[in-house]
Each structure stands twice: as C-alpha cells, then as structure tokens.
Image: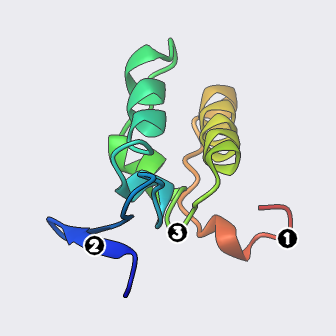
C-alpha cells in the first residue's frame, strides 16, 4: 500500500505528516518565501520571484539560502535572479 495520500492535489505521507515535494509548493514550505516577502525590510518586487528561485527545492536550508541570494542581489543593484538556479554549479 502506498503511504502517500492525495489531499487537494498535494502528496503527503500518511501517519507522520512528513511532507514531500518542492518547498514552495507545500504548506510548511510556503512560509519561507512568505516570511521573506513580508518581513524583510528590502521588498522583493514580485512574490513570484521568491517562489521561482525555489522551484523543485525540497531542502529548507537551500530555499532560505536562495531567497537570501535573491534579496542580496536585488539590494545591491536591483538585479532580479530569474534563471533556473538548479543549473548553477553552486546552486
């Protein structure tokens, strides 16, 4: 029996409540870009930018680091990271 169940299109593990899938696409993970967008003194121009840099990311620390890189680059000179960071050697 598959331990995953589908809840409104979200795959989650049954029992322990552990999440699977991209950070930005799950309930717990949405908090990372939302907190950065709302609480950071430097405002990202678009919320979707914070989601896009985290497509397919399942590691919370990687998601936080990518958002920090985005905000640092934007704060320095207005650069918006729009490339797929999965193709960067440093991620």
Few, some or many residues within 10 Å of mark 3 (<14, 14–19, 20+):
some
Q: Earlier in the sequence, mark 3 or mark 1?
A: 3
Q: Quadrant of the N terminus?
A: bottom left
| Element type at mark 1 | loop
Q: Residue furthest left?
A: 8
Distance between mark 3 and mark 1 Cα atoms: 16 Å
At horizontal 70% and vertical 41% (from top left) the residue drawn is: 65
Residue, far top: 41
Q: Earlier in the sequence, mark 1 or mark 2?
A: 2
Q: Can you identify the residue that label 1 sits on?
A: 89
In the picture shown, does residue 44 fall above or below 79? above
| Residue 15 position by quadrant | bottom left
Q: Position of residue 77 (x, y in %)?
A: 65, 33
Pointer 3 residue:
56
51 to the left or right of 7: right
Secondary element at tag 3: loop
């Amino acid at each position: 029996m598959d331990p995953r169940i589908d809840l409104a299109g979200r795959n989650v593990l049954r029992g322990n409540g552990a999440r699977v899938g991209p950070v930005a696409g799950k309930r717990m993970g949405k908090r990372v870009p939302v907190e950065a967008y709302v609480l950071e003194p430097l405002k990202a121009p678009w919320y979707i930018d914070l989601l896009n840099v985290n497509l397919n990311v399942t590691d919370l620390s990687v998601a936080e680091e990518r958002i920090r890189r985005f905000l640092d680059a934007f704060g320095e000179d207005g650069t918006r990271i729009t490339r797929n960071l999965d193709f960067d050697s440093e991620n």
